[in-house]
Image (tube, rainbow, N blue to C red):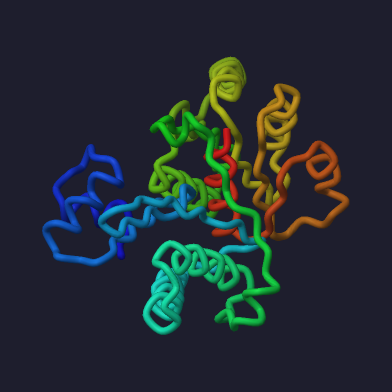
Amino acid sequence: MLNHQEASLITGMADATAEEMARRLLESHGATVVVIKCGPRGALVFDGKTVVEVPAYRSKEVWKIGSGDNFVAHFAHHWLQHNRSCFESADLASKATAFYCESRAFATPESLAAFNPSPIVVSARYAAGWRPTVYLAGPFFTLAQLWQVEEARDNLLSMGLGVFSPYHDVGLGSAEDVVSVDLEAVERTDLVFAICDGLDSGTIYEIGFARALDKPVVVYCENEGEENLKMMAGSECCLVTDYVSAIYETLWLAATL
């Protein structure tokens, strides 16, 4: 059991599909079953005869620490101890991981049975290899703001998404220098990740412009009250108060476009 990057490194098949890597791993390592986790696409499970793609499931929040171990433990529990098929075991492990990410608790049989998360259904073009580009909106006028923009850009890129960052791709300048370039980038990109603590006027404008174009917007904001976020909530932005959850919400949304 490994993720897509680990499978790529072990097999040396950087440009191969998950199924091709799974077949190579089964042959080279004498495994009974290979499970390759593929981010928002879920997990590919191969038992030597059948290939099944098990979906990832949405959670209201994302708590990453221990989530991979949680998946492995639940898969092993259902497959080895309860003799369920590897495919059913992987699906239950995926649901249990969503439960863990949302509650930070290990799913019991009772809690897992009562948990009914929605699967992430990726678009056909995302499944075929297309990757959306995110417009990274947010202030970058203090050290803390710059650090947050850097982190968000790095994290989104690490998820395989394209990123347009006004700070990195345009820089500081006068209104004449930057505004038209930034707004053209909003038009070109596929969705917006907006950092809204502090209610920076430029960021708020970019959100409104994106929504006028019917672009999806994920708003990350921890410290503003409902009144200050009323327009974002009312224009169907996705409001998230936790940073990691906001990054994952952006990935999940991007994968469905």
Could you tell me residue 228's position as x and y percent?
83, 49
Q: Nearer the viewer, residue 130 or 127?
A: 127
| Residue 109 sits above or below residue 61 on the image | below
Could you tell me residue 170's position as x and y percent?
47, 26
Q: In what quadrant of the picture does the C terminus appear?
A: top right
Q: Quadrant of residue 3?
A: bottom left
Could you tell me residue 37's position as x and y percent?
38, 56
Q: Nearer the viewer, residue 39 or 187?
A: 39
Residue drawn 57% across and 49% down?
120
Q: Nearer the viewer, residue 209 or 198?
A: 209
Q: Quadrant of residue 210?
A: top right
| Residue 65 sits above or below residue 169 on the image | below
| Residue 183 sits above or below residue 20 on the image | above
Residue drawn 59% across and 16% down?
180
Residue drawn 41% across and 69% down?
68
The residue sitting at the right extreme is 227
The residue sitting at the left extreme is 28
Q: Is residue 57 left or right of residue 126?
A: right
Could you tell me residue 135's position as x and y percent?
55, 33
Q: Is residue 240 left or right of residue 243?
A: right
Q: Nearer the viewer, residue 202 or 113?
A: 113
Q: In what quadrant of the picture does the N terminus appear?
A: bottom left
Q: Is residue 29 visible?
A: yes
Number of marks in the image? 0
Q: Is residue 66 visible?
A: no
Residue drawn 41% across and 84% down?
81
